Image (cartoon, helix red, strand yellow):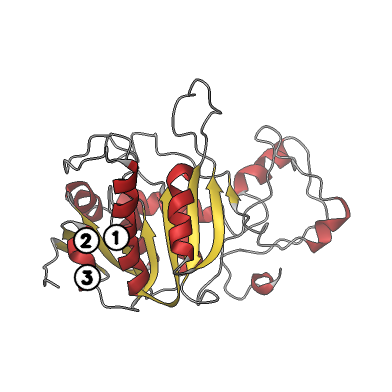
Amino acid sequence: MVTMNPIYETELGKLYQTDCLKALPNVPSNTVDLAFADPPFNLGKRYSSGIDDSLDESRYIEWCESWLSEMVRVLKPGGALMHWNLPKWNLALGGFLSRNLTFRNWITVDIKYSLPISGRLYPSHYSLLYFVKGPKPAIFHPDRLPISCCRHCGGEIKDYGGYKSKMNPLGVNLSDVWTDIPPVRHQKYKRRDANALPLKLMDRIISMCTDEESIVLDPFGGSGTTYVAAELLGRKWIGMELDCSTAVSRLDNLDEDREHLAKIHLNKNKLFTEADLIRRKKNNKPLSKNYTLFDSHDDNCPARDRD
């Protein structure tokens, strides 16, 4: 173990500019509430750090297992490990993690990540593995989602029939297929040439697996989305990256991300989005009187504990 100094520090977090395999041994065992990883996918991409992203398959798996073992070690009992990768790699790495942790979910995130490939089905999703240390999670409060509505008229896409009165006023249960996470393509939110994690994705993961003052670890910081989300949500965090310049620049000015996160929060944990309610009113589609609506940001809302 080698003592290291962070290249960047806030009241909540510390960022280390180094190889994660050098930094992870410095993190004490059983101290992290959420360990999230979005490693290079071994697709031969060029990174500013100059890493080799074209390893033999066996070497890539071995490399991943080395830092995943460290992530398992630092997790608290009941802590969550989330691993974001292509399905190809998560097949093997999920088996490895199953020998050390308890499997919770294979979450499919519907994002088209490449052009169609001849002779194969069009790859259109990422895999997010969700494991916990021990039999069950110490923290688990997933977001609820608004009812899916037509983007033209605002009407419900699914007919809930006689169940409208039983719908939770805070929205629909989160499933293991996420179709509402947009890729980062808008120049306003794109921080680097390589792929960047959507802020909405990290808000959902951190909100589900941590509380305020929980500790979040991400050993592949990239553009810094995990650290930004942790900062804005009041979580402590530990970060690592070979080239921290993009993450540092982003952390130095959180105004745009703070505004973006506020918009994300306006459309979660409620039965209908404001935009859909406006569309309904415009198209003369009043809500059924069987629905019950509450302010999702009211801490005293009785629907918070309703299934």
Q: What residue sits right under mark 3 in the picture? A: 25
The quadrant in which the N terminus is found is: bottom left
Residue 2 vs 83, above or below: the answer is below
Q: What residue sits right under mark 2 in the picture? A: 21
Q: Nearer the viewer, residue 119 or 176?
A: 119
Where does the image place residue 11, in percent across and percent down from the top left? 23, 71
Q: Are marks 3 and 2 in contact (CB under 8 Å)?
A: yes
Q: What residue sits right under mark 1 in the picture? A: 66
Q: Nearer the viewer, residue 290 or 304?
A: 304
Label 1 to label 2, Cα distance in Å?
8 Å
The nearer-to-camera label among 1 and 3 is 1
Name the side, left or right, on which 289 lies relative to 307: right
Q: Amino acid at mark 3?
A: Pro
Dot 2: within a 10 Å radius of its alpha carbon, few (fewer than 14), some, or many (20 or more) residues? some
Q: Residue at x 58, y 70 (%)?
A: 298
Q: Amino acid at mark 1?
A: Ser
Q: Amino acid at mark 2?
A: Leu
Q: Are marks 1 and 2 in contact (CB under 8 Å)?
A: yes
**Residue 204 visible in the snapshot:** no
